[in-house]
Image (cartoon, rainbow, N blue to C red):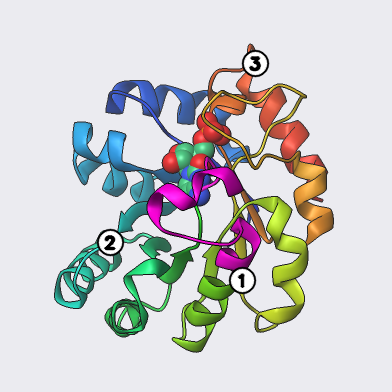
Amino acid sequence: MPSPVIIALDFASQDEALALVDRLGAEAGFYKVGLQLLTEAGPAVVRELVGRGKQVFLDLKTHEIPHSVMGAVHAAGKLGACMVTVHASGGSAVLRAAVEAAQPYPQLRVLALTVITSLADDDLPEIGLAPSVRAQVERLALLAAACGCHGVVASAQEAAFLKPMLPRDALIVTPGIQLGDGAPPDQVRVATPGQARQNGATHIVMGRSITQAADPLVAYRAAARAMG
Ligand code: C5P
């Protein structure tokens, strides 16, 4: 897995997504395909990226019964994805099923989603969670590790305390990354690439601050530099 900067291709069409990939060129090698692009363009877009030699994080965010999660993880492996996401709140049977389904695909890493980066402490009571984002992230990350997941998705703000409590080789993938001060209104637990690296993130996910930048390549380079 060469680049620690994963660019989220949150576009409405394959043409727009591949136009950005072309614009970033050979320097950028790791892309995230999420629900919007997958639903719009289908799995062909993943095959196209893999065919171009890119690493693909397929952000399926599965929250399903174990049998369905297994099927989805298999499908991700067959497509050539190297990361796939499952909600840790699905519980241990789901996490173990995801890890088992990934076994035939040596390149595939199962990442457990902890608490999405658009939620803050105040948002937890309405979904029945308490007492804090930190406690919930910690609980789910430990569960994911115990079930054999290869890593977790959390915000960079949690990476610092997750690092010492997870296995040494665990991936800590952090979205909610902004290059400047401004954060989009739907992201709450944000950080810069430098802060993410300092806190121990192994990978950062960046969408709009690269894809909507005046010059996406300049923005990508700034992030890649900060991640070392
Ligand atoms: O545009 P922005 O950089 O905010 O995009 C962040 C990307 O990371 C989106 O594709 C979003 O789905 C994803 N993500 C997130 N928070 C999580 C997990 C994934 O923002 N906890």
Q: Position of residue 86 (x, y in %)?
A: 36, 64
Is label 1 or label 2 in front?
A: 1
Circles 1 and 3, Cβ within 8 Å, touching? The answer is no
Q: Secondary structure at mark 1?
A: helix
- Residue 17 marker: none
Badge 3: how crowded within 10 Å, few (<14), some, or many (20+)? few
Q: How many C-alpha atoms fall within 10 Å of the one at disc 1: few (<14), some, or many (≥20)?
A: many
Q: Which residue is mark 3?
A: 215
Q: Is residue 207 visible?
A: no
Q: Amino acid at mark 3?
A: Asp
**Dividing the picture into quarters, in which one does residue 24 lie?**
top right
What amino acid type should be assigned to the residue bearing mark 2? Answer: His
Residue pointed to by mark 1: 138
Residue at point 57% right, 34% down?
A: 187
Residue highlighted by disc 2: 63
In which image quadrant can residue 168 be found?
bottom right
